[in-house]
Image (cartoon, rainbow, N blue to C red):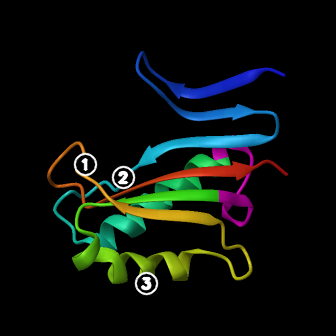
Amino acid sequence: MSVQRQLTNERMSQIVTHNGTVYLSGQVGDDMNADVGQQTRETLANIERLLDLAGTDKSRVLSATIYLKDIDAQFQAMNAVWDQWLPKGSAPARATVQAKLCEPEILVEISIVAALP
């Protein structure tokens, strides 16, 4: 089975597809001055765009790992956006952890594994 990589640079690929599964690198929002709700909305929009480019969609998400800068302060606001974004009946396996992210302005990062149709 071949491995396909999209949006690749010397360090990473945004999308890797293998054996009917799509792996997305960790995604963040665009506005680093926004609150966690807005950063989550932007992050999920970026994820949708990448899933579409890979040939799948958010209803086929298998697993999500969500990294929050401050889980105590941000978990509810992130979940409010996540719950609106996720199609009913499509809840993936999920882990949410607190993490020191690569830039201090980043409040949320999400990585996704999804199935191809």
Horizontal side of 95 relative to 62 (left or right) equals: left
| For marks 1 and 2 on the same chain, the one whose residue lies earlier in the sequence | 2
Horizontal side of 80 relative to 16 (left or right) equals: left
Measured as percent of width and height from the top left, residue 86 is found at: 60, 75
Q: Nearer the viewer, residue 77 or 7?
A: 77
Whether the residues at callouts 1 and 3 have beta carbons within 8 Å, the answer is no
Question: Which span is picked out in magenta?
Answer: 53-62
Horizontal side of 67 relative to 1 (left or right) equals: left
Badge 2, how many Cα within 10 Å: few under 14, some, many 20+?
many
Residue found 72% across the figure and 23% down from its top: 3
Whether the residues at callouts 1 and 2 have beta carbons within 8 Å, the answer is yes
- Mark 1 vs mark 3, CA separation in Å: 21 Å
Describe the element under mark 3 as helix, strand or loop: helix
Describe the element under mark 1 as helix, strand or loop: loop
- Residue type, label 1: Leu
Badge 1, how many Cα within 10 Å: few under 14, some, many 20+?
some
Give the farthest residue toward the top.
Answer: 10
Q: Which quadrant is the N terminus positioned in?
A: top right
Whether the residues at callouts 3 and 2 have beta carbons within 8 Å, the answer is no
- Residue type, label 2: Val
- Residue type, label 3: Ala
Q: Which residue is mark 1?
A: 101
Describe the element under mark 2 as helix, strand or loop: loop
Relative to 62, say whether 4 is above or below. above
Q: Nearer the viewer, mark 1 or mark 2?
A: 1
Measured as percent of width and height from the top left, residue 41 is found at: 41, 69
Q: Is residue 7 magenta?
A: no
Relative to 23, say whether 96 is above or below. below
Relative to 25, say whether 77 is above or below. below
Residue found 66% across the figure and 63% down from its top: 58
Q: Which residue is mark 2?
A: 28
Q: Which residue is mark 3?
A: 80
